[in-house]
Amino acid sequence: MTDSIPDPISPPARLLMGPGPISAYPSVLTAMSAPLVGQYDPFMTATMAETQELYRGVFATRNDATLLVDGTSRAGIEAALVSLIRPGDRVLVPVFGRFGHLLAEIAERAMAEVHTIETEWGQVFPPSAVEEAIIRVRPALVALVQGDTSTTMNQPLDEIGAICARHGVLFYTDATASLGGNDFEADEWGLDAATAGLQKCLGGPSGSAPITLSERAVEVVRSRRRIEAGIREPGDPSAPDFVRSNYFDLGMILDYWGPRRLNHHTEATSMLYGARECARLLLLEGRRAVIARHRLAGRAMLAGVEALGLAVFGDVAHKMNNVVAVEIPTGVPGDAARTALLDDFGIEIGTSFGPLHGRVWRIGTMGYNARKDAVLITLAALETVLARFGVAVPAGGGVEAAADVYAGAE
Amino acid sequence: MTDSIPDPISPPARLLMGPGPISAYPSVLTAMSAPLVGQYDPFMTATMAETQELYRGVFATRNDATLLVDGTSRAGIEAALVSLIRPGDRVLVPVFGRFGHLLAEIAERAMAEVHTIETEWGQVFPPSAVEEAIIRVRPALVALVQGDTSTTMNQPLDEIGAICARHGVLFYTDATASLGGNDFEADEWGLDAATAGLQKCLGGPSGSAPITLSERAVEVVRSRRRIEAGIREPGDPSAPDFVRSNYFDLGMILDYWGPRRLNHHTEATSMLYGARECARLLLLEGRRAVIARHRLAGRAMLAGVEALGLAVFGDVAHKMNNVVAVEIPTGVPGDAARTALLDDFGIEIGTSFGPLHGRVWRIGTMGYNARKDAVLITLAALETVLARFGVAVPAGGGVEAAADVYAGAE
């Protein structure tokens, strides 16, 4: 098996214009290759603290408990849910796409009594529907996706926090696909917990999950605190309803990131460097400016695909800035067209899940690729490929419409 | 909070000679900054398959189910344990240091009935002690650390697999600290599951956990298979005793790495690149050659610290190649001496846990740093610092003794 050792990694050039992962910012890739330091090196602990402060800026929060979970975005989701949900707790999950099902699934595995409400794919919930369900179910926690890439919808959250507070319910959102490219206000919206990943609007690689917890969420986590055998000392707590995961026990993860620096995992140093750079770039450009850049790129891509004659899926008024779903024109083999885009132009766009599989493509404009040139190149290539498969497309129409949006914004 | 944006990451120069994490191989850091591709890009899936094959070489196995868990080494441990342990299963954990307690802790959180046997820190178990406990406890699984950095001991595993097989018990080992620097033969030793991390002898950053599972272990995992809501199709399995974690459900992780490529997490691309390069370097140099390099570096460091008059902790005959624990000489403030090494020489050595805290330092020679120059520099700096704190050390004695070991090996 060791006869043929492959060469060093040398990925092909790709412009990633799908629903994520997307091409990382160049300086994030540079940060990933910075030399390692020890886990209790003063530089390491300072970098961890600095990264926490940067993510407070990204989440728009003053939550002390803002940190990284070492894993992909769904590691952050699971850490939030298993740490906040006690077995038997009722959890309400409003489902408007695939990732709502995922929250319900993870909550169920955490032994919650899960109640879902569903809306048609392509729609979002009015706040009143969530409140009605809360009154009916009386959950301990509402778990709600913000941006669900499976449908491209962006659930408005600004009124849900107040509703949850009124009913004494914890409010968690999965902001993996939306954070950094769409409005997000953890404190102003009354969120108790939010998690994300780097591989969408934050412009980094998958593998680190930023998370923020309100004081109220921290109280729940702390009440379930159990310091692990091996480093537990006399007098250290061990709650009877301790979290049924060691790796995702946010109480221990908080102790590791906190002043006590109690050993838990060994922080993934390169991912920390990358996560730090994602947040640094975002705040350097300005949080609102980055969101505005995503909004503009999203508007331009939308105008472009519409000018190419493609029908847009879902309630466009509630579409995320960073992704659009378009119906695959009749007669066009969806996967073959995507393969042509990839093979001939090095451009990736996305396929779809569940009820939309084979019916729509998903085109993203996020992070580093929420850029005019990336939008125009993608539209030019898409036009060529559509024409190749016999679709009547107006020559240059998509590019022109998108360029007009950019020109109008200048 | 966004008033002062920090500069790009710029870590200080460090020679990491502790028990891990250690300095990564330069080409691993380079690989970490390679451009990203999409998660179903043919290049990505080929790279995943290639990485699986490379880790078969590292683990010395033909197990098809050899892959990466996206998280630190303890993510790999938890994935193995929650996927293999059904709630209520009896699990035997022979504990000879801190990380044995961790296995017991994680198994307990996975709702196992955990039975431990313990031996004094600094010792390992004779196979007969494990067999006696198996006969008494009748566990479904034995979970045993190979190399426990907390004591520096390397538990011999070569006879345990046959014992487990004889009694119909699954055999899992945590090889985080030992793999790549000490003998390891997954197939020959009859292991059903083994996990590791990159940040020890494999010479990479923390954040990816290589894992290998035997056919027998895969059967257990498969029998608990449940495809998650959102991508589940009619006829897909949903076992009643499904794994109580989504992220660590090896059944779904196998489906993601397998031919079906069923969406689960979004593979951490940069960590994959890094993990691939760690394994590639190891196999390029030769698995046995890398282990021999660790053995030599370990012997040289041992000779060096003994020549400096430092007492070595534990049963040296069963010491891991890649770390040595030395008693802190009377009168020397352990942490101040470590700080002096770090601040004046940029060299990190390790402190200790539990009963050894404040009593021993742990000095590692692993991965990239299992090198003659790293060993000699560390000994020279240590000598200086010891002398500064009033210890009578033979001038150049440590360096000379270590150099003699290298000379003798030429």
Image (spheres, coloured by chain):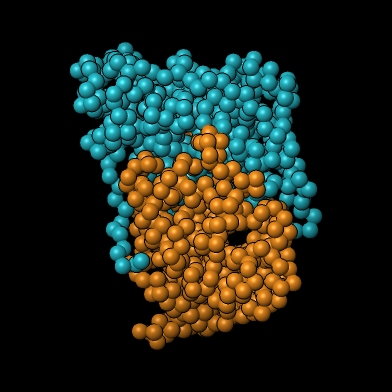
Chain colours: A orange, B cyan
The image position of residue A337, as x and y in percent, is 58, 67
The image position of residue A85, as x and y in percent, is 64, 56
User: Which picture quadrant has residue B368?
Assistant: top left
**Is B132 situated left or right of A268 in this image?**
right
Residue drawn at x 39%, y 84% is A409
The image position of residue A158, as x and y in percent, is 55, 76
Q: Residue furthest top?
A: B408
Q: How many numbered marks, from 0 up?
A: 0
**Is B328 situated left or right of B207 in this image?**
left
**Quadrant into which the N terminus of chain A falls:** top right
Is residue B240 at all visible to an observer of this figure?
A: yes
The image position of residue B165, as x and y in percent, is 71, 23
Residue drawn at x 45%, y 24% is B152
**Is A100 situated left or right of B338 in this image?**
right
Q: Residue furthest bottom?
A: A408
- Is residue B335 placed above or below A57 in the rendered structure? above
- Is residue B117 placed above or below B12 in the rendered structure? above
Residue drawn at x 64%, y 61% is A103
Residue drawn at x 40%, y 82% is A406
- Is residue B127 placed above or below B340 in the rendered structure? above
Return the residue nearer the eye: A310 or B61: B61
- Is residue B61 placed above or below A107 in the rendered structure? above
Is residue B25 at all visible to an observer of this figure?
A: no
